[in-house]
Image (cartoon, helix red, strand yellow):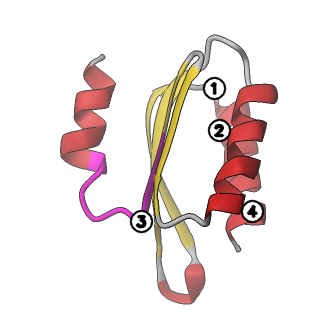
């Protein structure tokens, strides 16, 4: 997938974590506690459409402010849900 290449080259550099979901496959890497990875994985598999394929790269700014960059196909409503869960779990 071209967006995976884009993530690896463009979005992946200088990030604290990356999440890639390609339908049933889910990869979570980076500076996220193992317990929180489990919580995120459960949400991403259970609460998003089964055909969702996307990547998000995140980094923590000053005051643990979360900055996210997206690739792939995920509607705005679903992106907002993922943002909200990330903020809740990672704070």
Q: Which badge, 3 or 2, is on the more N-terminal residue?
A: 3
Which mark is on residue 75?
Answer: 1
Picture residue at 63% right of the left edge, 26% below the top: 75
Q: Which badge, 4 or 3, is on the more N-terminal residue?
A: 3
Which mark is on residue 79?
Answer: 2
Q: CA distance from mark 3 to mark 1?
A: 24 Å
Q: Classify the position of the N terminus by image quarter.
A: top left
Q: Indicate the position of residue 47 as horizontal and vertical percent values.
A: 81, 29
Circle 1 or circle 4, nearest the eye: 4
Residue marked by disc 4: 89
37 sits left or right of 71 in the view: right
Q: Residue furthest top?
A: 51
Q: Quadrant of residue 74?
A: top right
Q: CA distance from mark 3 to mark 2?
A: 19 Å
Mark 2, other Cα within 10 Å: few <14 / some 14–19 / many ≥20: some
Residue marked by disc 3: 16
Picture residue at 24% right of the left edge, 41% below the top: 8
Question: Is the Cβ of the residue at disc 2 closer than 8 Å to that at disc 1?
Answer: yes
28 sits left or right of 76 in the view: left
Secondary structure, mark 1, is loop
Question: Is the Cβ of the residue at disc 3 closer than 8 Å to that at disc 2?
Answer: no
């Amino acid at each position: 997938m071209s967006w995976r290449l884009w993530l690896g080259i463009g979005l992946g550099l200088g990030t604290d974590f990356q999440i890639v979901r390609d339908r049933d496959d889910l990869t979570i890497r980076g500076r996220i506690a193992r317990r929180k990875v489990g919580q995120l994985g459960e949400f991403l598999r259970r609460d998003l459409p089964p055909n969702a394929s996307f990547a998000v790269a995140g980094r923590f700014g000053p005051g643990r402010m979360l900055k996210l960059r997206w690739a792939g196909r995920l509607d705005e409503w679903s992106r907002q849900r993922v943002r909200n869960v990330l903020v809740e779990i990672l704070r």
